[in-house]
Amino acid sequence: MTAKLIDGTAIAAQVRKETAEAVATLKKERGIVPGLATVLVGENPASKAYVSSKQRACEELGMTTIGQKLPTSATQEEVEGMVKSLNADPKIHGILVQLPLPKHLDEEKILGAVSLAKDVDGFHPLNIGRLSMKGREPMFVPCTPAGCIELLVRSGVEISGKEAVVLGRSNIVGLPVSMLLLHRNATITICHSRTADLPGVCRRADILIAAVGRAEMVKADWVKPGAAVIDVGINQVWVEHPADKEYTCAVTGETFVAHRRDQSEKGGRRKMGDYCTECDTAWLKGQEPPDSCAGCEPIALFRKYKLVGDVDFDDVSQVAGHLTPVPGGVGPMTIAMLMHNTYRGALHTFE
Ligand code: NDP
């Protein structure tokens, strides 16, 4: 391996330590304790896990946290009403609406209902708008993109004047990270599913950010020697073949034989893995899996997968100058930056 490893776990720990110290000072000098409210709609297990880890992080850093939960059947009015009551709560300085929301809800309207001053996720249209304009400052910057920049800066990677290629143009990662790189005077190319000659474009990059959701798509010959590569992707791939093995479903308690489905090239929990026969029946009919279906859970329950990024780590580490691992790269930074944003939300109350 020639690449220098960018240790996201260590850098995130440093950001959290700095935030905890700032929180303690704020409490001592101003009597203010930063507070984060999470809004969870429905029973999506991954969302539940994310929300609990954010709440745990708050507690560890000396902040308060309120966890609001609504059923999957919650109406648009109920969710917006909850957001508005949190907007009015002076003990809350940050509101995080956990995505994805159930399909019947208007995500854009709900995110737009979060007070600009408490938008710690940075997804309010005004914050995104300001991020996209020259000379304007958003109140908050989305956490994962901010984490990517922090990793580069704290690893001593020069951004100004460099050629940066961002693989992915999503609202939550690709687009905002491109804007942040632009603000730091990089020259940006944003790639997506229609980009011609993806490897050729990526090879131009001094800084390559991969946020595409395709397991190990970026290979060594896509990377300019010495480039800094930040791998945002989180993809689940199977490392074991538990075909014909008997399991007890931890949700239903029933015993069944798990069997293997074809691995799809698309990353993500919903497209690959082993499923209980009950759940598979629904899937094989080509239906959308219900969010709360017990059968969607065996991946988590049986833990027969490993997480990989969008970058082929072993391959790319032979040519890159800096490289983040998955897990232990961008992932830990997302929560660290959320904590930092919540602290900043509390600071705004007397700015
Ligand atoms: P999206 O699915 O919203 O966006 C993926 C982007 O990649 C799209 O712009 C899409 O192009 C592009 N793309 C997809 N397939 C290809 C392809 N074959 N060639 C070129 N471009 C392609 O994903 P997200 O931005 O939400 O997430 C990206 C990855 O980052 C995921 O693995 C996700 O799990 C991970 N992630 C990690 C976080 C963390 O904390 N570490 C936080 C958030 C996300 P088009 O626009 O044309 O469809």
Image (spheres, grey):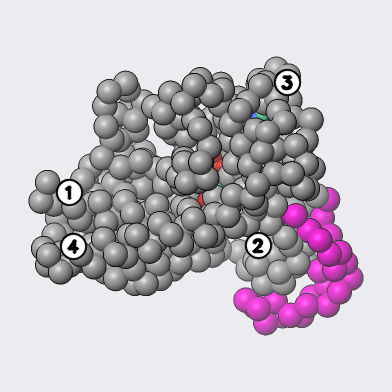
Q: Secondary structure at mark 2?
A: helix
Residue 307 appears in the picture as rendered: yes
Vertical arrangement, residue 83 with respect to residue 247, above or below: above
Residue occupied by mark 1: 348
Q: Is mark 1 within 8 Å of ligand 1?
A: no
Labels 2 and 1: the sequence-earlier one: 2
Q: Is mark 2 within 8 Å of ligand 1?
A: no
Q: Residue at x 32, y 28 (%)?
A: 129
Labels 3 and 1: the sequence-earlier one: 3
Front-most of residues 298 and 131: 131
Disc 2 crowd, CA 10 A, few/some/many (<14, 14-19, 20+): many
Q: Residue at x 30, y 42 (%)?
A: 140
Magenta span: 236-262
Residue 133's spot in the image, x, y percent? 32, 22
Give left or right: position of 223 versus 16.
right
Question: Which of the two marks, 2 or 1, is nearer to us in this view?
Answer: 1
Residue occupied by mark 3: 200
Q: Give the Cα separation between the discs numbered 3 and 4.
A: 49 Å
Label number found at residue 296: 2
The extreme right residue here reads 244
Label number found at residue 26: 4
Give left or right: position of 121 versus 206.
left
Q: Amino acid at mark 4?
A: Leu
Disc 4 crowd, CA 10 A, few/some/many (<14, 14-19, 20+): some
Labels 4 and 2: the sequence-earlier one: 4
Question: Which of the two marks, 1 or 4, is nearer to us in this view?
Answer: 4
| Residue 199 inside the magenta-drawn segment | no
Mark 2 and mark 3 in contact (Cβ < 8 Å)?
A: no
